[in-house]
Amino acid sequence: MEKVRNISITMLGVIYVIYYFLLVIFGGKISFSTFWLMLAIVMFLIGMIKKLEKNKKIKVNKSVKKIFTILVSLGAVSFIIIEGFIIASGSNNKFKQSDYLLILGAGLRGERMSLALSQRMYKSLEYIDKYPDVKIIVSGGKGPREYITEAEAMKRFLVKHGVDENNIVKEEKSTSTAENIEYTKEKLKQIDGRTDIKISIVTTNFHMFRAQFLAKRVGFDTYAVPAKLHFLLIPNYYVREYFAVINSYIFDRIGDGSRVLNKT
């Protein structure tokens, strides 16, 4: 049994290393990709410690083992629960009519949209095709190595695909999900005085749960329009989102007057 466990730990480490290099080959500097390399190192260290312990070269304190087991167990339970919410929120495929379609930015390379943003935009076109009169808010500022704002790139895409530019509102200050929501609310206060506005949010499936709970914090009534994620990126971004949800829940205190905004 112990031999099987040690082999499993080593194999996991090898798999994590392979996945890291696949991410590097696929997209260069993909957010969070180094996590897998670090996790591989942890797996190899655990395997080494167990081997040394078996050979009686070191002795790990039983209390340390117990604390480690408890922490890992608690982490696993929280991971399963949060991932359940993330997966459920990103699985909705039914469009509902709303007053505004809010499209969240996802990065540019110069003026060219990232794969994630491109997928969001094509999903937006599906919604607009069904509800052509919807008002559209494109939300995203200008980040490093971006020549224009994400909002401007999204507007250009929509206009190129036949959307009336008079139906498009740009929010160009935001650099995080929390700011997307916060600044969109400020924009809507300027152009629409209603308090019962219904909004459909377009973002990538793994990101939908966090976007919606942040929107709820500022009082938005939202529907989900999730775009698909490339299959190779699924493990990376779903695991990353687990940590992002915890971070946003604690620190992104938007809508309550404290305005603590994280760049995530």
Image (cartoon, grey):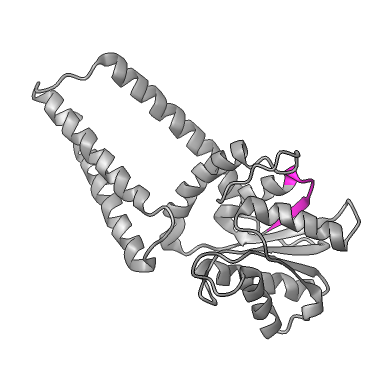
Query: Residue at (63%, 46%) from the top-left corner?
Result: 261
Residue placed most toward the observer, 228 or 139: 139
Q: Residue 46 in the image: x percent, y percent? A: 23, 33
| 159 and 225: which is toward the camera | 159
Q: Is residue 244 left or right of residue 122?
A: left
Expressed as whole percent of the image width and height from the top left, the position of residue 85 reads 59, 43
Q: Is residue 72 left or right of residue 197?
A: left
Say whether residue 202 is visible: yes
217 drawn magenta: yes
Q: Is the residue 103 above or below the residue 260 in the image? A: below
Q: Give residue 29's quadrant in the image.
A: bottom left
Q: Residue at x 25, y 45 (%)?
A: 13
Front in this rendered view, residue 179 or 137: 179
- Quarter of the image that includes the N terminus: top left
Q: Is residue 78 left or right of residue 222?
A: left
Q: Is residue 182 magenta?
A: no
Give the side of residue 231 with respect to residue 227, left or right: left
Q: Which residues are magenta?
A: 216-224
Q: Give the quadrant of residue 95.
A: bottom right
Residue 3 visible to an observer of this rendering: no
Please provide percent x and percent y for residue 33: 38, 54
Number of numbered labels in the structure image: 0
- Above or below for 208 versus 161: above
